[in-house]
Amino acid sequence: MAPGDLDKALCGMKFPTDENLIVGLDRADDAGVYKVSDDLAIIQTVDFFTPIVDDPYAFGQIAAANALSDIYAMGGIPKTAMNLVAFPVKDMDISILRQIIEGGLDKMTEAGVVLVGGHSVEDKELKYGLSVTGFVHPDRVLTKRNLMAGDHLILTKPLGTGIINTAIKGGLASPEIIEIVTQLMATLNRDAAEIMKNYSVHACTDITGFGFLGHLAEMVQDSRLGVQIHSSRIPILPETLNYARMGLFPAGAFKNREFYEVVVEMAPTVDRLLQDVLFDPQTSGGLLISLEGNDADDLLRELKGKGIRDAAIVGEVVSEPKEKILVG
């Protein structure tokens, strides 16, 4: 779904709500949050998509990691999940579905998540994902909407998965980069989420289908603040720019640019290919963490010490220009 499509579909609708709803449909965020008691809230999210790699088991792992990521981005711990499956049973061997589910199960086991059910339908197009429920303290919910002037921004995974997945589909990706990107997308954001709990994090999101600049735009919206991004510090997957030079962009990259470029000001020195990478839709991307500048170096050091080697400080929150992203 293109950016803004859901907003258009929901425009003017009135939604049921009550006083215990902490995060709902009144604002764009990574998941919904509902207060159960003074010390417990549940986080709910759902995500599923078509295969992006050829290996069924790897696809299951990636889809699960992607769905679980929203819970981590909200500051929570995923606890239960339900499978969502659409499968062309007349056209594909059932063993393929088994491998996909096994990949998802192994990733859930790694995350300490219990599979409690699911739903499947016969469909011409294969799809897989999860509905996930997590726990968080009501006072420790992280959202996209709490940027503070002087904050530094840390990105925990490199960009480029959309472009590389396009190269994979076209049969142009090298075996080495296929292995690298598959492992990256299957990696949980759990370690980064656990580490950031020790710091004064103000806002957080995970980078997925709207791309780096799209998700950052949602953080800037209504914040009365702006963001300065240092493009040279953005971690990018190997071979990404080479594939971009070949024109291997997913359609979502152009939709993201079209929708979000109104809030982005690119310096003339930023290469056009790099600009496109910043709009590239990601699958199971990293966390984008906004925290006090004085803590950023310490958090970065801990992330790298935990093996999150590509993590980088990529920008800072500024007072002016308001609700704009400056990329230099």
Image (spheres, rainbow, N blue to C red):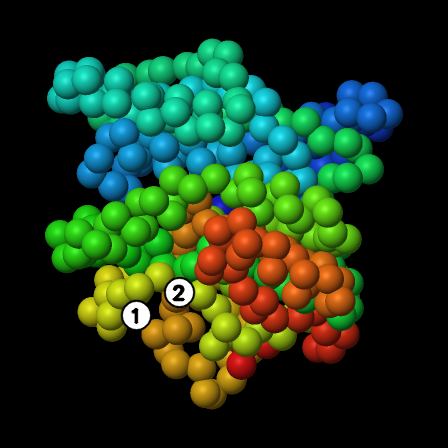
| Callout 2 secondary element | loop
View extreme (bottom): residue: 268
Residue at the (59%, 35%) spot, across then down: 71
The local crowd at label 2, few if under 14, some if 14 to 19, many if 20 or more residues have their Cα within 10 Å, is some
Image coordinates for residue 134, horizontal then vertical, percent:
63, 27
Q: Quadrant of residue 153?
A: bottom right
Q: Quadrant of residue 7?
A: top right
Say left or right for 327 vs 55.
right
Say left or right for 49 vs 4.
left
Mark 2 or mark 1: whose residue is earlier in sequence: 2
Q: In the rendering, which numbered label is found on residue 133?
A: none
- 234 or 32: nearer the eye? 234
Say left or right for 143 vs 166.
right
Query: Where is mark 2, residue-wise?
Result: 236
Residue 202 visible at all: yes
Residue at the (24%, 62%) spot, across then down: 248
Tell me how far mark 2 sits from mark 1, CA to CA. Answer: 8 Å
Residue at the (36%, 15%) spot, across then down: 120
Image coordinates for residue 237, horizontal then vertical, percent:
35, 61
Q: Amino acid at mark 2?
A: Ile
**Mark 2–mark 1 CB contact (< 8 Å):** yes
Residue 328 position (above or below residue 149): below
The local crowd at label 1, few if under 14, some if 14 to 19, many if 20 or more residues have their Cα within 10 Å, is some
Query: Where is mark 1, residue-wise?
Result: 241
View extreme (front): residue: 305
Say left or right for 123 vs 110.
left
Can you say which quadrant of the picture contains the N terminus? top left
Q: Quadrant of residue 323?
A: bottom right
| Callout 1 secondary element | helix
Residue 222 visible at all: no
